[in-house]
Amino acid sequence: MPIKDNTNPPHAHVCLISDQPIPNLVPLLLEKPDKALLLVSPEMKAQADRLKKIIQPRGIAVKTREIASAYDFPAMQQTCEKVIKGSPEAELTLNVTGGTKIAALAAFQAFYRNNRRIIYLDTANHRLLQLAPENREQAIDVNLVRVRDCLALYGLNPLPGNSPAPVRRPGLSDLARLLITDSPLLSRLNNAISRVGKNPQYANLDLNELGPGADKLVPLLEGCGVAGRTGPARLNISSPEKVFFCHGGWLEEYVYWCVKDLALQGLDLAINVKVEWDGKGSRPTKNEFDVLFTHANRLHLISCKASNPERETASGTRATEALNELDTLADRAGGLFGRAMLVSARRLSDYDGERARKMKIQLVEAEAVNCLRDKLLGWVEER
């Protein structure tokens, strides 16, 4: 049951803007008030603008009111008193989830003293709590947050031309199982493609270089529509997209379909999402995410690695780089409630496995990837 009676218009949410926007967004999408009043410190202006761009197209009128400091208790109380007195006929709801603790406490006192409604989003337990004028709670059993909206809220703007949802390739699961189980064959395939050069337009491989297992690999690549024999011992991969698939893209598509097959309620799922970070300058930062999805109003990020994780790089190993990047991007794109998983076709070292655990990055590696569906189910059900 909803904890708010929608028969008392006009209804407005008063939101305390912080660098964690999801606790403000979810109640707005759930209750769909007529208006949203954003209380914004100078440091949070950009964050308020991002939230405004998301909710205005959904029919919620937005106004902002600047507060001089998120740490000035008396000033915040005065601001809230003015808001309440300036809207005597409106049904006001304070969302006390955001803002600094000082700002939230000051706002709470002002709204509580005036017998106005106060709510709090319990993100961990998927509940909206009403704290005043009486205690109620509502389970949030629907996924309201889209991937693109979540990224944009944190200042990561999806670029045009991102990959559409892939068509399921015949034999993809069999291909993944072969390459995950036969690590030497995967290594030989990766090395053969790497020798063609960086970002090749096509690849013409010598099947003898693929060694044992090539007789099983080639029919599966042909079945996936990404390669074809041009002679007794030659394999042609005819486009950059097909080369990408053979050089690790197969794992991303396999992970994508494993997530899709979970049939999670309200799932929003994307693959190969390129983003550009907010910021000034002639060369804004860009990143690409392998697989992204929202479930239970939380962003889940999955990085997929089919290369040798222990190959040395300038900053350690490929696994070290992957973990560092994933940790940073999960925080930057998903905030406090973003979740990260690394799926590696090959086994990481004990050192990197321990680093993943300390970073709270879910790790699925080597032959465990063949049981990815079960791993994903356990992951999304964790709180």
Image (cartoon, grey):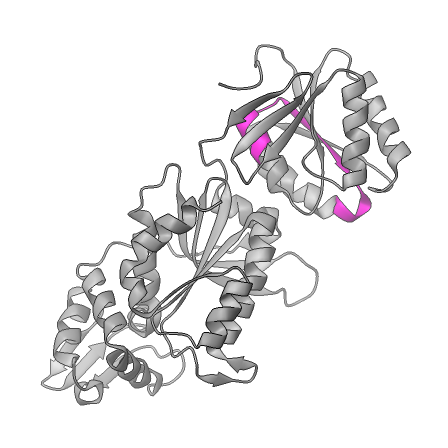
Question: Horizontal and vertical percent for residue 8?
Answer: 62, 10
The magenta span reads 26-44
Residue 25 part of the magenta-drawn span: no
Question: Horizontal and vertical percent for residue 224?
Answer: 20, 64
In this rendering, the count of numbered labels is 0
Residue 33 part of the magenta-drawn span: yes
Using the image, determine if residue 284 lies above or below residue 321. Answer: above
Question: Horizontal and vertical percent for residue 56?
Answer: 61, 33
In depth, the one of 335 and 291 nearer the eye is 335
Q: Residue at image x 53%, y 58%?
A: 275
Residue 249 visible in this rendered orientation of the protein = yes
Q: Which residue, as the protein is rendered here, is positioned at the far left?
A: 232
Using the image, determine if residue 351 lies above or below residue 341. Answer: below
Q: Is residue 269 left or right of 80 when viewed as pictured?
A: left
Residue 225 visible in this rendered orientation of the protein = no
Question: Horizontal and vertical percent for residue 51?
Answer: 64, 40
Using the image, determine if residue 115 lies above or below residue 293. Answer: above
Q: Is residue 74 left or right of 259 when viewed as pictured?
A: right
Q: Residue at image x 13%, y 75%?
A: 216
In depth, the one of 171 and 111 nearer the eye is 111
Q: Is residue 224 left or right of 3 when viewed as pictured?
A: left
